Amino acid sequence: MGTEMKQFIDLHLHSNCSDGVFSPAELVEMAHRVGLVAIAIADHDSVAGVTEAITTGITAGIEVIPAIELSVQFASWNDVHLLGYGIDHTDCNFLERLVAFRERREKRNVEILDLVNKRLNAEKKEAIQLKDVLASARDSIGRPHIARVLQAKGYVNSTEEAFRRYLSPCNIPKFYWPIDSAINEIRQLGGVAVLAHPVTITDDRRELHGVIAQMQNMGLDGIEVFNNISQPDEMEYLRRFAEERNLLITGGSDFHCSEDSLEMGKGRGGVRFENNLLPPLKKLITERQENARVALL
């Protein structure tokens, strides 16, 4: 009796529709080359690449789950990342809200660029032009796009150095969705809400336990157990916690292709994301989408 070969997925990728390097189609093709069977392109506050990814996925034989990564606020924590899977990425009201967020974000990033240029001017260096930043972006610009231009001009040697020397000192606070509103939005769109890389909130397990429990009371469906931030013992803790709380377990690399340490389809320590994570997620997506359809009747 033979054993089935394991299949692997990656439910957290970024394209150049937010702050990734590659187009959605290129990501799908890369996923095919590294042997993945399913992916989710979860761009920051954008679903602009979902249709392209799904279309390419049909040809490449890769299943693409519609997704997004929202920047949210919970209590005193800003920039908590919430993944929404299986959402209706064509919903007009949602798209209008994303446009409003993008306009706020673009205004912020232009202001950050102005501050970076003041710092460059003080260092007797040529300023960065907005058109150069836009050349590496697609749906909207972000700080990583500025970092890439800083590196291309030879002002820094890495993305990390760009943030340390320029982008972090020149940062301007973001606008965040309240987490309860964001979870409700995802669910209304027939989607499933999952907390990305939970240990970025706090590495205090007692505190993190309380935070996730509160989020679950607000409607959180799952946590990204397998990721590139958590250490192996932290991932095991998150796995046990998710099982105890009856939360979905997901896994993703958070691949942008701007970090040398991140590989598509792999988490910290080379952990792979097995395809057995997908059926429970898809089952809940199907149930949520059916509920959303019924609500419209």
Image (spheres, rainbow, N blue to C red):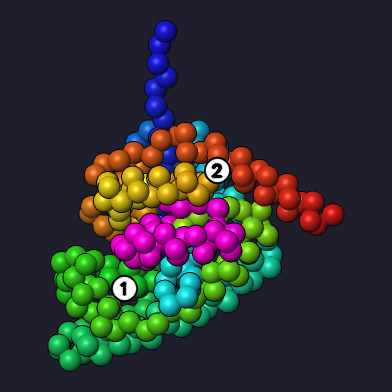
Residue pointed to by mark 1: 146
Report whether 290 appears left or right of 251.
right
Observer-nearest of 34 and 265: 265
* Residue at left offset 38%, top offset 65%: 207
| Residue 221 counted in the magenta span | yes
Magenta highlight range: 196-224
Residue 21 seen anywhere in this rendered image of the structure: no
- Please state the horizontal and vertical placement of residue 169, each as a whole percent of the image: 25, 83
Which residue occupies 33% across, 87% down? 114
Residue type for callout 2: Leu
Residue 98 falls in which quadrant of the image?
Answer: bottom right
Name the amino acid type tagged 1.
Answer: Ile
Residue assigned mark 2: 281
Instruction: Work out whether 90 lies above or below 115.
Output: above
Along the line of sight, the residue nearer the viewer: 45 or 20: 45
Residue 242 appears in view: yes
Quarter of the image with the N terminus is: top left
Where in the figure is residue 259, as x and y percent of width and height? 26, 57
Q: Is residue 269 left or right of residue 295?
A: left
User: Which label was assigned to residue 155?
Assistant: none
Relative vertical location of residue 19 with respect to residue 33 in this rendering, above or below: below
Which of the pair 12/215 is nearer the observer?
A: 215
Residues at marks 2 and 1 touching, judged by CB atoms closer than 8 Å: no
